[in-house]
Image (cartoon, rainbow, N blue to C red):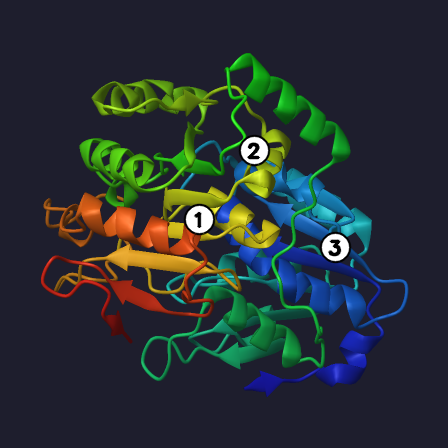
């Protein structure tokens, strides 16, 4: 640990820039730490520097006062150019931030973002860092993952905040559904023919990375089994680009289902998840929305990253253990997708039934093996 400025310098900071340049779910997992910064100083405001996807979720995070969208050249989305980078530095400089905290996963370097903040003249700059950042960071925590420990993403960020004496008593994820969105979601459900009083089982079968997608045919069989065993109603969600996937799965099902795919914005999706009895999904952004809203989750969890399981909500995290675990790849490097394809539809239905019936399930940072030979075994 190298915290040069100390808590005293951070306690005086009023305008703090929070840098999180990943996706929607990553920003949601940062919200408890942002709350810690917000609550640990008087008249403090937080501005989020985020990707396009991250900026889209920001209006529903009350800890964030303002958002700056930035396409960083060191991140996956394309579209950055030097002129935009220079303009972003100028905007950050004009905002006269007192401090910047850079949130990353342990496989990422904070130094490009730190340099951005350095050039913008932000006097305090905090991050986890694997190497000596010299003058790019005024305060840094030596990277300990994965060699000495692996923490949940939320805990990692809370620990970073605590290093400069910023803490919160409320470690839940943050997402607030507007009342108007509840009305629009209800109208969309009526239009889709969803008038049942049965518990809603929301199935979100998409994911941005191919390596994190459970097979559609397995989803179809799993949902048929859920409907055989329970009184739930299956409702599909997804983006406009995922409508075809949703319809393929629905066509493979023997039982009736409903679709809201392509019909919901983020606010309306939040409203649907808020009233759902259960979400079944891949490891993707809506899982973290559901966790923020207290909705139980069956998470088909590709072993690309061990840190992103549902946080502080009843859940069943299902995967099959494989030697190539924690590859951090968007496309399965082995080509077999074994960590997901070996999870049987029966196992998914079992997990859904347990959660729907209120059985005890994991709440913390737990991975639950679910292959045919070792169904339900908890691993570290």
Mark 2 and mark 1: span between their CA atoms?
30 Å
Q: What element carries label 1?
A: loop
- Where does label 1 land, which residue? 74
Q: What element carries label 3?
A: loop
Mark closer to the chain start, 3 or 1: 3
Q: Residues within 10 Å of mark 3 (few under 14, many from 20)?
A: many
Mark closer to the chain start, 2 or 1: 1
Mark 3 and mark 1: span between their CA atoms?
26 Å
For residue 339, above or below residue 323: above
Residue placed most toward the observer, 207 or 185: 185
**Does the CB distance between marks 3 and 1 fall below 8 Å?**
no
Q: Quadrant of the C terminus?
A: bottom left
Label ID, residue 269: 2
Residue placed most toward the observer, 47 or 253: 253
| Residue drawn at x 50%, y 35% as measured from the top left | 80
| Residue drawn at x 48%, y 22% as measured from the top left | 260
Q: How crowded is mark 1: few (under 14 residues within 10 Å), some or many (20 or more)?
A: few
Q: Position of residue 237 (x, y in %)?
A: 45, 29
Nearer the camera: disc 3 or disc 2? 2
């Amino acid at each position: 640990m190298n915290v040069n400025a100390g808590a005293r310098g951070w306690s005086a900071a009023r305008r703090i820039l929070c840098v999180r340049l990943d996706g929607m779910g990553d920003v949601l997992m940062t919200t408890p730490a942002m709350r810690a910064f917000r609550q640990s100083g008087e008249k403090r405001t937080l501005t989020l520097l985020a990707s396009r996807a991250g900026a889209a979720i920001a209006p529903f995070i009350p800890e964030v006062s303002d958002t700056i969208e930035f396409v960083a050249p060191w991140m996956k989305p394309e579209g950055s150019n030097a002129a935009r980078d220079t303009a972003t530095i100028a905007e950050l400089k004009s905002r006269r931030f007192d401090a910047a905290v850079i949130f990353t996963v342990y496989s990422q370097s904070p130094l490009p973002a730190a340099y951005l903040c350095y050039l913008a003249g932000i006097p305090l700059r905090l991050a986890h860092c694997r190497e000596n950042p010299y003058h790019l960071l005024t305060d840094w925590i030596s990277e300990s993952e994965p060699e000495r420990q692996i923490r949940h993403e939320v805990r990692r960020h809370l620990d970073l905040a605590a290093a400069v004496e910023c803490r919160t008593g409320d470690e839940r994820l943050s997402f607030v559904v507007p009342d108007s969105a509840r009305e629009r979601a209800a109208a969309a459900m009526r239009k889709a023919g969803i008038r049942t009083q049965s518990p809603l089982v929301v199935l979100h079968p998409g994911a941005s990375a191919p390596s994190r997608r459970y097979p559609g045919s397995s989803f179809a069989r799993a949902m048929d089994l859920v409907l055989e065993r329970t009184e739930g109603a299956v409702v599909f969600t997804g983006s406009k680009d995922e409508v075809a996937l949703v319809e393929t799965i629905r066509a493979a099902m023997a039982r009736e289902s409903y679709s809201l795919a392509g019909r919901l914005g983020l606010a309306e999706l939040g409203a649907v998840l808020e009233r759902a009895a259960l979400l079944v999904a891949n490891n993707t952004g809506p899982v973290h929305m559901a966790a923020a809203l207290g909705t139980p989750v069956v998470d088909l969890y590709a072993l690309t990253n061990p840190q992103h399981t549902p946080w502080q909500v009843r859940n069943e995290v299902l995967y099959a253990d494989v030697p190539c675990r924690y590859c951090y790849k968007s496309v399965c490097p082995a080509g077999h997708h074994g960590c997901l394809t070996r999870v049987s539809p029966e196992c998914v239905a079992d997990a859904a039934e347990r959660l729907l019936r209120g059985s005890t399930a994991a709440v913390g940072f737990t991975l639950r093996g679910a292959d045919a030979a070792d169904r339900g075994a908890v691993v570290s």
